[in-house]
Image: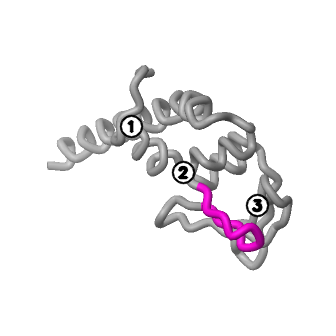
Amino acid sequence: MSNTLTKDHLRQLRNHIEIIPLIADVLEIIFKTHDGRFRFMCPLCRDFDTAVNTDTNLARCFRCKRNFNPIDMTMAVKRYSFVQAVRFLEPILHHVVAHAKNRNRICAKHDRRQA
């Protein structure tokens, strides 16, 4: 874990930590699936008029008119400062990156065997 918060590091936290597993599994926010759509209880207004966009990795509350990326969501739920939220998310990012590297190694090894 670095002591400096570079733009690239913050971009990785926002883009590589998937918002739905963060909401459901890590932050344990109450959620439901309605008509095949993932809805979560907004940590600010407690309403379920929410949605997630997996393409942009953002969550939205239509009642509050608030967008949440993984850092914002962590700040709201945990009542953390920006830096505290980043530090909380860093081990999760480390796990995601390590898993991706391992998966890439396995795929490359499999591809070499196929050739």
Please state which of residues 47 and 22 is positioned toward the viewer in this rendering.
47
Q: Residue at x 57, y 48 (%)?
A: 70
Q: Quadrant of residue 6?
A: top left
Mark 1 neighbour density, 10 Å: few (under 14) some (14–19) many (20 or more)? some
93 on left or right of 37? left
| Coordinates of residue 21 in the picture (x, y in percent) | 63, 49
Mark 2 neighbour density, 10 Å: few (under 14) some (14–19) many (20 or more)? some
| Disc number lying in front (1 or 3) | 1
| Coordinates of residue 39 in the picture (x, y in percent) | 74, 66
Report the residue that reaches farthest toward the left.
Answer: 115
Residue under label 1, please give it.
9
Q: CA distance from mark 2 to mark 3?
A: 14 Å
Mark 1 near mark 2, Cβ–Cβ under 8 Å?
Answer: no
Q: Quadrant of residue 98?
A: top left
In the image, the segment drawn in magenta is 59-68
Q: Is residue 106 magenta?
A: no
Tell me which amino acid carries mark 3.
Phe
Tell me which amino acid carries mark 1.
His
Residue under label 2, please give it.
18
Residue under label 3, please give it.
40
Magenta span main SS = strand
